[in-house]
Each structure stands twice: as C-alpha cells, then as structure tokens.
Amino acid sequence: GQQQQQEQAGDSADQQQGEEQQGDDAADEKAQQQESAEQQQAESAPREQQQDELDKTIAEAQQQDLERDQAMEQWLRRVPDDPSGLLRQKFRYQSQQRQQQGNRKDDETYW
C-alpha cells in the first residue's frame, strides 16, 4: 500500500512537473507572441506615419489643383464672349479684303 502511495505521489509529481513544463511553454509562447506583436507595431508605426505624410501631400496637391482650376476659370470668364461681334468683325474684314482686291483688279468681274 505504501509503495502504491509512493508511486502515486511520484506520478503526481511527474504530472505536476509536466503541467509546469506545459505552463512554461505556454508562457514562452505568449511572450513570443507579445514580442512579435510589439515588433509589428514598431514596424507599422513608421509605415503609418509615411502613409499619413503621403496622404497629406496628396491632399495638398489636390487643393493646389483645385485652386489653379478656379483661377483658370476666373481668367477665362474675363475674356469677353461675344459671338455676334466676332461674326460682324469677320464679315467687315472680308468685305474690306474684297474691296481692296476690287480696286487692284478692275478688269475681273466677281459673280
């Protein structure tokens, strides 16, 4: 009976040691995971900062494009838009050209 108790105590101690070993392994694994997570965060922090800077640069460029487009539209609005006046000037110019040609070539008849 005593031998059985000693064997059981030995088995119990072995079992306890095994559990402690498993606990140590789990703790080591957890520590490695935590280290890995911290490393990833440390690596991703500069990437996030670079991405933020890139986003900021893009936003500034878009703002400049918008301002340039608005300035161009304002400048174009200052140009007078008078199609009828342009046609009148064209006809006046063509008429003057014909009169000048007519004065030079009296012998030709235009139909």
Image (cartoon, rainbow, N blue to C red):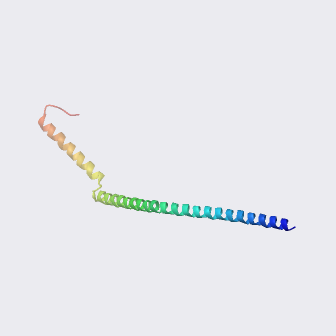
Report whether 78 appears left or right of 51. Answer: left
- x, y percent for residue 53: 41, 61
In terms of image quadrants, where is residue 80?
bottom left
- Which image quarter is the C terminus in? top left
Expressed as whole percent of the image width and height from the top left, the position of residue 81 reads 30, 55
Q: What residue occupies the far right of the structure in this picture?
A: 1
Q: Residue at x 45, y 61 (%)?
A: 46
Q: Is residue 15 left or right of residue 98?
A: right
Q: Is residue 48 left or right of residue 67?
A: right
Q: Quadrant of the N terminus?
A: bottom right
Q: Residue at x 67, y 65 (%)?
A: 23
Q: Is residue 39 left or right of residue 102?
A: right
Q: Residue at x 18, y 40 (%)?
A: 98
Residue located farthest toward the top when viewing the structure as drawn: 107
Please give the count of numbered marks on the rendered protein: 0
**Residue 48 at what x, y percent from top left?**
46, 61
Q: Nearer the viewer, residue 2 or 49?
A: 2
Quick one: 33 or 41, which is closer to the camera?
Answer: 33
105 w.r.t. 9: above or below: above
Q: Is residue 100 above or below residue 20?
A: above
Pick the front one: 15 or 83 = 15
For the residue pair 49 and 111, the one nearer the viewer reads as 49
The image position of residue 59, as x and y in percent, is: 40, 61
